[in-house]
Amino acid sequence: MSSDMNSLFAAFQDHINVEQELREEIRQVNKDIDQKTREIQTSLQIIHQDGGLSKIPECCVQARKLFLDVKTGFSKLAAIVPGDQYYRFHDHWRFSAQRLAFLASLIVYLEEGKMAMIDEVAEMIGVTTKREEGFHIDLEDYLMGLLQLASELARFAVNSVTNGDYKRPLHVSQFVAELNSGFRLLNLKNDGLRKRFDALKYDVKKIEEIVYDLSIRGLKSEEKSEPPSTST
């Protein structure tokens, strides 16, 4: 092999080594983000436990504090990932971003009874919403987070009834129905997003069955459903 060929392939190896080091650095940072994500999810699981409804404000405050560490993690990612190569490495944090979008949306729902806008989610994670600004939250990751929220709220509705809160499932039903209507306006092409959206109808059906059961048992309020207060 000629010296020119040796030099050429040596340069290739240098490039491979640099990229491997970058990917390993990204993995380490994302590992820390995943750890904080698990802690946030754990802190929010109290809403499903007996007596947990009264602790919603407290667990939301705790979850928001943990999101500060998530912000630090994404700041590190933004610093090490080249600005024009976001989607080259996106798969490393795609699922983390989706789960964080879900958790951020859950916090906003628990606090205000409304859907979190993408800019609210981006602010909590510590990224932007605009691709041209570099490190941002991908729209499909945000939408996937909302779909995960629907499933969590279906579970929440069941456990709320178990814990004696008969008003909350009514608001959950209204909220998820509106979310479903919104998603039906989209022409989804992404296979993963499309499949996850297909599962939304089962979440809607599950919640409707809970509301129907409350109705036939005479436990459904005839008043307009409002977001239940989370104050202690």
Image (spheres, rainbow, N blue to C red):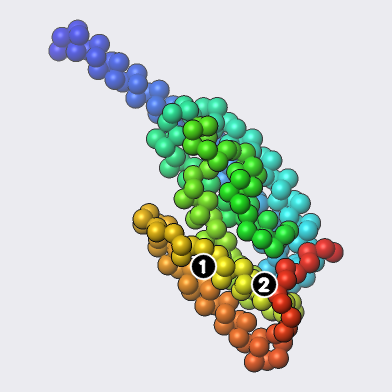
Q: Position of residue 151 (x, y in %)?
A: 55, 66
Question: Percent from the top left, x then y, of residue 18?
Answer: 40, 22
Quadrant position of the C terminus in the picture: bottom right
Q: Which residue lies at the image location 73% right of the left edge and 55% below the top edge?
A: 60
Residues packed near mark 1 inside 10 Å, few (<14), some (14 to 19) or many (20 plus): few
Identify the residue position indicated by label 2 in the image. Answer: 171
Q: Is residue 114 visible?
A: yes
Amino acid type indicated by mark 2: His
Q: Residue furthest top?
A: 3
**Residue 107 has which mark?**
none
- Identify which residue is drawn at 62% across, 68% down: 175
Image coordinates for residue 218, horizontal then vertical, percent: 71, 91
The local secondary structure at tag 1 comes to helix
Q: In the rendered view, does 225 fall on the left or right side of 84?
A: right
Q: Residues within 10 Å of mark 2 (few under 14, many from 20)?
A: some
The quarter of the rendered structure image containing the N terminus is: top left
**Left or right: 68 with respect to 82?**
right
* Residue 138 sits above or below residue 158 on the image: above
Please say if the residues under marks 1 and 2 sit with CB atoms less than 8 Å apart.
no
**Mark nearer the N terminus (1 vs 2):** 2
Q: Which residue is mark 1?
A: 181
